[in-house]
Image: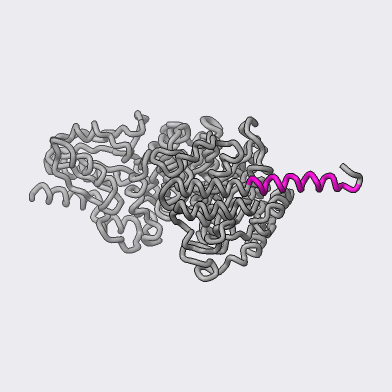
């Protein structure tokens, strides 16, 4: 490292570049899974969260092999975000890449919403929206009671945040002073019926709401790896849960999917897959 | 004094306290004597359960999420998955109706063994109106996979149930009924096992099946009918799920099997018994006494039992009419 600290920047820049490459590869993986399964998959919401999970699994969460009480936990509360989630588990070696070939096949562990199986990194079952945040708060509270050092991370969607139970859980995270709890709000400003601004118009207010509740809040471009990295690395304020409001793009990375709700849940044909892959490979 | 000790003195104390005020002190004793992993988790109803002493002596064993039943189940599930045994305690209907989806996902689907303790099962808080009566709770919880459903008859059975739940792994719902003083069904110790019905009175003509504090009325019914020469067996089916099929087979040849419950007609104890007999070769004629198919108007508990035809005297009349048909 040079005396002015630029060596540290250089190292971080390298790390960011690596994570960007991981994110790009996760997108390719997600698209191939969506195509291979032969049916509809939640593409839009699966692609908006890629950077968050690339950074979480690639740089933030501690590794396997640690004692139970030290190993960080992640819950995908917006259960339909599995394309990016399963891709992250394979990208960072939590599951075998070959397991992805079973996505949406009968009897697979990798179905349309996560099914709890901690040994392959699935800490909770989700699918019914607004419940994973409560479970995560319970895990973080258990860690406090037991003296465990693990961190609990939970990812929630902006449409999901329409559910009242999300706010029950957030309230309790503040009340129980869960400074071992981080909520990433994947704020892609869309939901099934269209723009969130047109369905339930609060998507631009999450920072204010969460701050008012008592969260430490960081609002960022949630598809910008460097910003996501910095946000996760920002230390917890003592006694406060942390929220990262990541403004993201639904269908991020594939021009014909971006901000297009036809891709909320759709089938990806071979031709469409090729077009998407070409675009992502050109972006290298 | 231990609240979970079986003694003559406690039998009197339990009856005077009523079900809910036994629970706080009993959980304290369970934490100290049986399993220190038990947590008292509530949605702002701790005081109803006399949790003050528990809170003072074991604050780490109390989790109050505020008036947020969905989060009670969800956060309780997180705690349960980390090795605690969570007693999630509040009004039965707010637990089992309002937070039913959380129960489905966290308890039924993930299999996390949270114990649901629901107060005001049936009509005992009826002056607050149907909003505070749990009248579909048995139907809702019984339909959830792997869920054990228990409705204790009196203070002793409540304590025995709490003790059993404190070391049990899977999910369960305990329905708490009645006002204080509660009728004493058990005047001495007895063998309580989850899933095993208890015969409270032997008889050969007809069988009366019930649970919870309503058994006090049902025993009166049996005495009245006995005076009329009708010999009644009374069964405490404290566990609605899993059902004690053996006990039901034993009475399949009776002239009439009567079920009595503080629940809507559909989906409760009577339905569970009828579902069982429907697929049996030998099945008895049944009379299903319940709250009916409409919500009762708000009233004091004793009046509500009358309005629904569930007093001991009324049930005797209804049964005699059925036999005369």
From the viewer's side, name the closer residue of B291 and A77.
A77
Q: In the image, residue A277 lies at what x, y percent?
A: 55, 51
Q: Residue furthest top?
A: B191
Give above or below for B325 relative to B299: above
Q: Residue furthest right?
A: A3
* Residue B189 occupies quadrant: top left
Residue at left offset 22%, top offset 35%: B248
**Is any atom of residue B306 visible in this view?**
yes
Question: Start and end of the magenta stretch?
Answer: A4-22
| Number of on-image labels | 0
Q: Is residue B305 left or right of residue A135?
A: left
From the viewer's side, name the closer residue of A181 and B59.
A181
Q: Residue furthest bottom?
A: A198
Task: Please identify the dominant SS of the magenta region.
Answer: helix
Q: In the image, residue B281 lies at what x, y percent?
A: 14, 35
From the viewer's side, name the closer residue of B282 and A39.
A39
* Residue A72 occupies quadrant: top right
Residue A10 part of the magenta segment: yes
Residue at left offset 77%, top offset 46%: A12
What sort of colour scheme is used for the picture?
A: one colour
Residue A79 part of the magenta segment: no
């Amino acid at each position: 490292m040079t005396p002015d600290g630029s060596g540290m920047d250089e190292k971080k820049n390298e790390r960011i570049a690596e994570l960007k490459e991981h994110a790009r590869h996760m997108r390719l993986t997600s698209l191939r899974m969506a195509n291979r399964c032969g049916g509809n998959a939640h593409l839009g919401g699966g692609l908006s969260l890629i950077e968050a999970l690339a950074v979480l699994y690639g740089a933030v969460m501690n590794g396997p092999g640690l004692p139970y009480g030290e190993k960080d936990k992640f819950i995908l509360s917006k259960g339909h975000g599995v394309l990016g989630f399963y891709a992250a588990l394979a990208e960072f070696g939590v599951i075998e890449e070959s397991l992805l070939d079973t996505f949406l096949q009968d009897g697979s562990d990798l179905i349309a919403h996560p099914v709890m199986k901690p040994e392959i990194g699935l800490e909770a079952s989700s699918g019914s929206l607004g419940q994973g945040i409560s479970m995560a708060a319970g895990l973080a509270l258990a860690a406090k009671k037991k003296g465990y050092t693990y961190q609990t991370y939970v990812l929630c969607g902006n449409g999901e945040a329409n559910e009242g139970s999300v706010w029950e859980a957030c309230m309790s995270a503040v009340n129980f002073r869960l400074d071992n709890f981080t909520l990433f709000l994947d704020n892609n400003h869309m939901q099934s019926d269209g723009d969130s601004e047109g369905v339930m118009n609060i998507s631009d207010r999450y920072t204010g709401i969460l701050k008012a509740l008592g969260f430490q809040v960081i609002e960022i471009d949630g598809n910008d790896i460097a910003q996501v990295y910095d946000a996760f690395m920002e230390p917890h304020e003592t006694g406060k849960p942390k929220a990262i409001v990541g403004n993201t793009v639904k269908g991020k990375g594939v021009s014909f999917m971006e901000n297009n709700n036809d891709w909320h849940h759709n089938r990806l044909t071979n031709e469409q897959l090729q077009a998407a892959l070409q675009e992502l490979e050109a972006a290298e | 004094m231990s609240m979970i000790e079986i003694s003559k003195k406690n039998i009197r104390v339990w009856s005077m306290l009523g079900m809910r005020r036994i629970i706080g002190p009993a959980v304290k004793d369970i934490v100290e004597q049986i399993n220190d992993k038990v947590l008292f988790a509530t949605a702002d109803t701790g005081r109803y359960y006399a949790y003050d002493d528990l809170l003072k002596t074991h604050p780490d064993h109390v989790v109050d999420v505020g008036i947020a039943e969905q989060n009670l189940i969800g956060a309780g599930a997180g705690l349960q998955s980390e090795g605690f045994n969570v007693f999630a305690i509040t009004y039965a209907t707010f637990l089992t109706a309002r937070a039913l989806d959380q129960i489905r996902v966290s308890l039924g689907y993930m299999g996390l063994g949270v114990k649901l303790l629901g107060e005001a099962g049936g009509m005992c808080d009826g002056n607050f109106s149907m909003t505070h009566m749990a009248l579909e709770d048995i139907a809702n919880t019984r339909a959830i996979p792997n869920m054990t459903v228990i409705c204790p008859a009196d203070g002793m059975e409540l304590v025995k149930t709490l003790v059993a739940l404190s070391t049990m792994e899977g999910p369960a719902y305990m329905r708490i009924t009645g006002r204080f003083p509660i009728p004493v069904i058990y005047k001495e110790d007895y063998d309580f096992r989850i899933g095993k019905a208890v015969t409270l009175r032997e008889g050969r003509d007809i069988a009366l099946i019930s649970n919870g504090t309503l058994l006090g009325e049902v025993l009166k019914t049996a005495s009245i009918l006995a005076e009329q020469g009708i010999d009644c067996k009374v069964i405490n089916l404290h566990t609605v799920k899993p059902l004690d099929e053996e006990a039901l087979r034993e009475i399949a040849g009776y002239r009439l099997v009567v079920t009595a419950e503080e629940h809507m007609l559909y989906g409760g104890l009577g339905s569970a018994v009828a579902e069982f007999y429907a697929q049996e070769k030998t099945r008895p004629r049944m009379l299903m006494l319940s709250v009916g198919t409409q919500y009762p108007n708000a009233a004091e508990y004793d009046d509500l039992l009358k309005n629904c035809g569930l007093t001991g005297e009324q049930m005797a009349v209804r049964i005699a009419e059925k036999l005369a048909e």
